[in-house]
């Protein structure tokens, strides 16, 4: 999954490059900047003194020192002055400049904080949108694993109006009963826990009565209309998930790369699916392709069935994805933002 949202301390990220939300001096400060300097050690400051500072919207690179990365990319985000002072373009430039440097230095993975959303005052929801849109645009033409790192739950929200609509939809559709009221669970933006599965014992279960009277010694024997079981399987075998996917890509007029990039799927995983007609990916991957192909709910259910899955109203994850499909919203990153907010798996994850 090329673009991932994670909750972590960015100084603990293991990747090729970590991005520092720095000030123009590059000599350290508060927030993420101070945390990175403390974790990297005093040698980072000594190298930063040689760089001559950095302009807002630009980026410069240093070694990673004591961090679990090869490089630290320092970028200076804009201070929020109400949105009328070129803040959006400057923030976008921070991500673009950092990604260009990462590519130039051969990085395969990079971790960003939510630049300018702390003491610089950039509204978090708008800062997330700039980060996601810029990363998504880069990934349409480049291969790189991009992390957007949020320190805690309060650092992120996919938008109150959207989340409110999803909560209502989940509350309307969710079929399981819980000891804690659903409204309380969903008001916290958390996944509703599923009830514990019933204990399975070896005791024989009583067969339901479907109207037929069977003797106690009745033994079920399937009737085969001639031929072997192998012949029967050949007769009923249907189009596989891989075959349906490739057919739908052709029908859409998209290229393979357009489809897997829109699905936020790694090229290597797509190659496995293409080369093996019997490959069965995980459910988040199947749904990611359904979103990339803009499939309606009926066709989404069909594609899921090809991989052995179904949509269920006992799953918060399923209901959230269904919500976007029935509302004709096929932005993979917007959907993943909402799933992240509800502590669910993201589309494109899980192989």
Image (tube, rainbow, N blue to C red):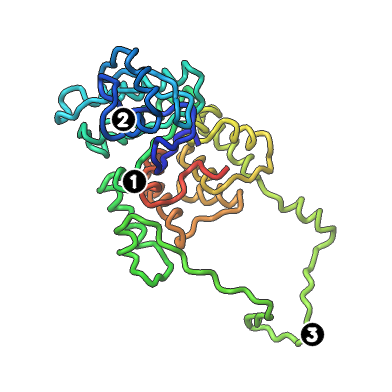
Q: Residues under labels 2 and 1: Cα distance? A: 17 Å
Tell me the crowding category of disc 1: few under 14, some 14 to 19, or many 20 or more residues within 10 angstroms, Cα based.
few
- Please tell me whether residue 271 is drawn above or below residue 217 in the rendered image: above
Q: Nearer the viewer, residue 221 or 186?
A: 186
Which label was assigned to residue 55?
Answer: none
In what element is the residue under mark 1? Answer: loop
Report x, y in % for residue 329.
37, 42
Residue at horizontal 39 percent and vertical 49 percent from the top: 326
- Give the mark nearest the N terminus, 2 or 1: 2
Report x, y in % for residue 141.
47, 22
Q: Nearer the viewer, residue 338 or 150?
A: 150
Which label was assigned to residue 217?
Answer: 3
In what element is the residue under mark 3? Answer: loop
Mark 1 or 3: the one toward you: 1
Report x, y in % for residue 206.
65, 82
- Please tell me whether residue 71 is drawn above or below residue 35 in the rendered image: above
Q: Residues under labels 1 and 3: Cα distance? A: 62 Å
- Give the mark nearest the N terminus, 3 or 2: 2
- Please tell me whether residue 300 is drawn above or below residue 2 in the rendered image: below
Q: Nearer the viewer, residue 274 or 94?
A: 94
Mark 3 or 2: the one toward you: 2
Tell me whether circle 3 and circle 2 mark residues in contact (CB < 8 Å): no
Residue at horizontal 30 percent and vertical 31 percent from the top: 34
State left or right for residue 300 relative to residue 43: right
Pointer 2: what residue? 33
Mark 2 or 1: the one toward you: 2
Q: Residues under labels 3 and 2: Cα distance? A: 77 Å
Tell me the crowding category of disc 2: few under 14, some 14 to 19, or many 20 or more residues within 10 angstroms, Cα based.
some
Pointer 1: what residue? 152
Residue at horizontal 25 percent and vertical 20 percent from the top: 24
In what element is the residue under mark 2? Answer: helix
């Amino acid at each position: 999954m090329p673009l991932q949202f994670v909750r972590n301390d960015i100084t603990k990220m293991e990747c090729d490059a970590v991005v520092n939300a720095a000030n123009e001096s590059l000599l350290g400060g508060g927030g993420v900047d101070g945390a990175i300097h403390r974790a990297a050690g005093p040698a980072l400051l000594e190298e930063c003194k040689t760089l001559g500072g950095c302009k807002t919207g630009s980026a410069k690179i240093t070694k990673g020192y004591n961090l679990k990365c090869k490089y630290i990319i320092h970028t200076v985000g804009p201070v929020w002055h109400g949105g009328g002072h070129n803040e959006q373009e400057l923030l976008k430039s921070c991500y673009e400049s950092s990604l260009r440097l990462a590519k130039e230095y051969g990085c395969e993975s990079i971790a960003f904080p939510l630049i300018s959303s702390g003491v610089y005052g950039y509204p978090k929801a708008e800062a997330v949108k700039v980060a996601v849109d810029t990363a998504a645009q880069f990934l349409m033409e480049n291969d790189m694993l991009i992390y957007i790192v949020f320190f805690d739950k309060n650092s992120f929200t996919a938008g109150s109006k959207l989340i409110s609509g999803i909560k209502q939809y989940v509350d309307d559709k969710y079929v399981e009963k819980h000891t804690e009221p659903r409204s309380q669970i969903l008001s916290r933006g958390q996944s509703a826990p599923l009830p514990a599965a019933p204990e399975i014992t070896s005791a024989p279960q009583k067969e339901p009565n479907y109207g037929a009277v069977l003797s106690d010694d009745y033994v079920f024997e399937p009737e085969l209309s001639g031929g072997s079981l192998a012949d029967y399987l050949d007769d009923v075998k249907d189009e596989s998930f891989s075959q349906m996917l490739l057919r739908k890509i052709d029908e859409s007029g998209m290229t393979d790369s357009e489809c897997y990039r829109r699905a936020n799927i790694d090229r290597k995983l797509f190659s496995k699916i293409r080369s093996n007609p019997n490959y069965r990916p995980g459910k988040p991957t199947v749904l990611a392709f359904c979103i990339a192909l803009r499939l309606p709910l009926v066709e989404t259910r069909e594609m899921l069935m090809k991989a052995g899955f179904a949509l269920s109203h006992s799953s918060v994850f399923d209901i959230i994805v269904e919500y976007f499909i029935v509302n004709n919203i096929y932005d993979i990153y917007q959907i993943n933002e909402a799933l992240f907010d509800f502590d669910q798996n993201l589309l494109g994850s899980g192989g």
